[in-house]
Image (cartoon, rainbow, N blue to C red):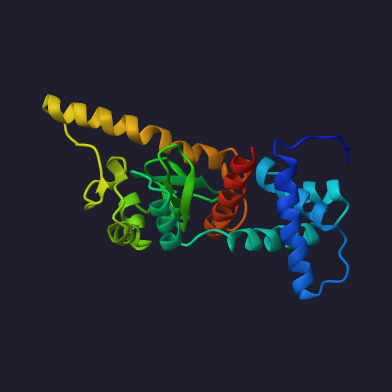
Amino acid sequence: MLFYRAAVDLSRSTLTYVAGIIRRHRKTIGSIWRRLTPGRQALLVLVHLRKGETFAELSAGFGISVATAWRYVEETVALLKARAPRLGQALRKAGQARLHYLVLDGMLVHTDRVKADRPFFSGKHRVHGMNIQVLASPDGTIIWTSGSLPGRSHDLTAARIWGIQRALERAGILTLADKGYQGAEEPIVTPYKGSNKPESQKQANRAHARLRGPGERANAQLKTWRILRKLRCCPHKAGRICKAIAVLQNYELARG
């Protein structure tokens, strides 16, 4: 096994933030001794999420067993996920911030599955994965991420399962979405479909795309965390990992 020094493109304040969460958790549960300090555990988790390194690689790099590396990641992801807002909380905060509209978009997290697992196969993307719904502000800040559904789930179906439309109706916030949500009712607004549209509809679609485009950068921000480019763990963990990463991403942007 060869070793080398490497870097993670995250701020020191994010490491301190995660280490603080771990330190308080250890104090709460009365954990007296661990193989790694809270700071080293935080670094291990950030390396796993940001760079997608395997548990075997983490084990070798941090001098612990594979099982211990797995436990540290599971524990920290759960702690971060607990800090992610619920849908109602996220929309109340968006209303308090006086956001004029939100952007709703679906994201497929690729998974390491075999062809027999048809429920996980997305016909749109032609890969196996899990469907995640993402609400973002007009500038692309992540407001909320959903749990995960098998990749074959349609975006509109996923939005209904997670109660997104009902929550948006209660909050009264206009939300822009792509053609995958065609058939949704207000306040979700989608582009006009079909060929030979009148010029007024074409102009409306162009305006819709201009407004929606920056907000859809939220998904690109999530995918900068390489663990989400292809999950090699249980696919049903995709939702909780996305929520944990959303917490980290927003903290990183706020302190950046």
The residue lying at 75 percent from left, 50 percent from top is 16
Q: Nearer the viewer, residue 183 or 149?
A: 183
In-image side of 122 versus 17 (left or right): left
Which part of the image, by quadrant, shows the C terminus? top right
Residue 130 visible to the viewer: no
The residue lying at 88 percent from left, 68 percent from top is 33
The residue lying at 73 percent from left, 37 percent from top is 8
Q: Position of residue 116 (x, y in %)?
A: 47, 54
Q: Position of residue 137 (x, y in %)?
A: 42, 43
Compared with 140, 85 (above or below) is below
Q: Residue furthest bottom?
A: 30
Q: Nearer the viewer, residue 76 or 249?
A: 249
Residue 71: which quarter of the image? bottom right
Which part of the image, by quadrant, shows the N terminus? top right
In-image side of 106 versus 45 (left or right): left
The residue lying at 63 percent from left, 63 percent from top is 78
Q: How many numbered callouts?
A: 0
In-image side of 235 versus 189 (left or right): right
Residue 32 visible to the viewer: yes
Q: Position of residue 132 (x, y in %)?
A: 45, 51
Q: Residue furthest top?
A: 199
Q: Position of residue 80 (x, y in %)?
A: 63, 58
